[in-house]
Image (cartoon, grey):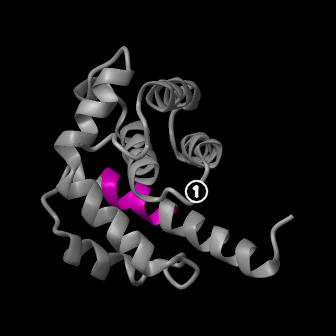
């Protein structure tokens, strides 16, 4: 069972993911920089609850590694990135970030969090697609070498 400090850190990461989902969704339609997005989301109700450094780093890496993340997603999915719903795509990019860069987060938690975001913000059945795609990524890629 997690202690109160761990629960607080977990909740802060959940809030960071929620903000990142919104920001990455927005980036699919705009040309905002990381700095512009961070400034914009500082006024969001979840900002104070979030791990702001985690949010900023996640957003920065997701945007600078978009091409590589797209390759990973394309290889694990029956659909190409251009065909994926923007919410599901943002959720997948967050999960790929965590899979590659947050080795302290277990794979099952990464998948569960991506599904949670999709159920909350995505299409009715989008979470099933995200689950299957992330399952394929976990089965076919080693977390330590996926970006090499």
Secondary structure under badge 1?
A: loop
Extent of the magenta region: 18-25
Assess whether residue 50 is covered by the magenta stretch: no
Q: Extreme top residue here?
A: 78
Q: Residue at x 53, y 23 (%)?
A: 132
Above or below for 28 versus 104: above
Assess whether residue 20 is covered by the magenta stretch: yes
Q: Position of residue 112 (x, y in %)?
A: 64, 43
Image quarter (top left, top right, bottom left or bottom right) of the N terminus: bottom right
**Residue bearing the label numbered 1:** 105
Q: Position of residue 46 (x, y in %)?
A: 54, 75
Instruction: Kindly indicate the quadrant of the structure image that contains residue 127.
Output: top right
Image quarter (top left, top right, bottom left or bottom right) of the C terminus: top left
Q: Residue at x 29, y 82 (%)?
A: 39
Q: Main secondary structure of the magenta part?
A: helix
Task: Report the front residue among 50 and 5.
Answer: 5
Q: Extreme right residue here?
A: 1
Q: Position of residue 147 (x, y in %)?
A: 27, 44
- 130 sits left or right of 8 in the view: left
Q: Residue at x 43, y 37 (%)?
A: 142
- 115 sits left or right of 146 in the view: right
Q: Extreme left residue here?
A: 31
Q: Position of residue 145 (x, y in %)?
A: 34, 42
Instruction: Kindly indicate the quadrant of the structure image that contains residue 128.
Output: top right
- 56 sits left or right of 132 in the view: left
For mark 1, does the 10 Å Cα neighbourhood hold few (<14), some (14 to 19), or many (20 or more) residues?
few
């Amino acid at each position: 069972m997690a202690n109160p400090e761990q629960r607080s850190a977990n909740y802060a990461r959940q809030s960071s993911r929620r903000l990142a989902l919104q920001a990455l969704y927005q980036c699919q339609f705009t040309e905002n920089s990381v700095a512009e997005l961070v400034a914009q989301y500082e006024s969001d109700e979840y900002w104070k609850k979030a791990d702001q450094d985690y949010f900023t780093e996640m957003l920065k890496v997701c945007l600078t590694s978009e091409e590589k993340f797209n390759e990973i997603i394309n290889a694990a999915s029956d659909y190409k990135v251009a065909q994926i719903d923007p919410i599901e795509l943002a959720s997948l990019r967050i999960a790929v970030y965590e899979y590659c860069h947050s080795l302290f987060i277990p794979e099952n938690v990464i998948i569960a969090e991506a599904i949670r975001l999709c159920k909350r913000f995505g299409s009715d059945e989008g979470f099933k697609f995200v689950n299957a795609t992330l399952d394929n990524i976990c089965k076919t890629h080693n977390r330590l070498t996926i970006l090499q």
